[in-house]
Amino acid sequence: MPSVVGLLEQHELAAQRRVDGLREEADRIQAELAAAELERREWVIARRRVDTVLAPDDGATAEAEDTADQRDTEVQSAPGDAAKPKSQVPVWCEGLAWSVLSVDYQRILTALADRARFHQGPLTCQEMAAVFGMDVVPARVEALRSTAKRLVARGWLAEQQPGRFTLAAGATGPGGGS
């Protein structure tokens, strides 16, 4: 007949094996949870990027088209200078007001105009996100970078150093250079 101490040791050993097995299972589940959370975050970022790309710009496109049509008939500018039909960001030309742009574009121009007025130099997209009170996360920064690059391509902004944006020489105020 086994001793009482021997029986207690057997039960203690069995309990220790169970604890070790549960810890291993908990570690596996914790690693799986971390991987699933990372995957979820990536999907959230992807959805936000798609939302940003597909989001309507509150009619700013229609305003830009109307303004571009009026400007074309009044000024009779060269085809390369005119806003292309269905263009969200018209090509900048002398006298074109900031009001042809959507509010988001105007906000970037205003922030850069303030920086220029106080002689603070160019802004990076990370700095823009912070100025606008956004979370400085890659998805937001990349969305701002895309917007700023579009403004550079259309002549509203200048990028003298990679990733550092300022107002273009002529687009100095909300009145379109005035």
Image (cartoon, helix red, strand yellow):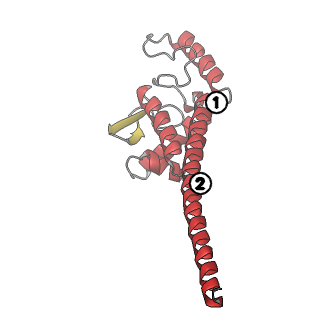
Q: Relative to the observer, which residue lies in front, 113 or 163? A: 163
Q: Amino acid at mark 2?
A: Leu
Q: Residue at x 57, y 71 (%)?
A: 17
Q: Quadrant of residue 19?
A: bottom right
Residue 102 % position (x, y): 60, 32
Secondary structure under tag 1 reads loop
Residue 91 visible in image: yes
Q: Amino acid at mark 1?
A: Asp
Q: Relative to the observer, which residue lies in front, 51 or 109? A: 51
Indicate which disc, 1 or 2, sits on the residue closer to the N terminus. Answer: 2
Q: Which residue is mark 2?
A: 33
Residue at the far left in the pictured view:
161
Q: Which residue is mark 1?
A: 57
Neighbour class for label 2 at 10 Å: few (<14), some, many (≥20)?
Answer: few
Q: Residue at x 38, y 46 (%)?
A: 122
Neighbour class for label 1 at 10 Å: few (<14), some, many (≥20)?
Answer: some
Q: Relative to the observer, which residue lies in front, 101 or 32? A: 32
Cα separation between marks 1 and 2: 38 Å
Location of residue 169 with respect to 67 vertically, above or below: below
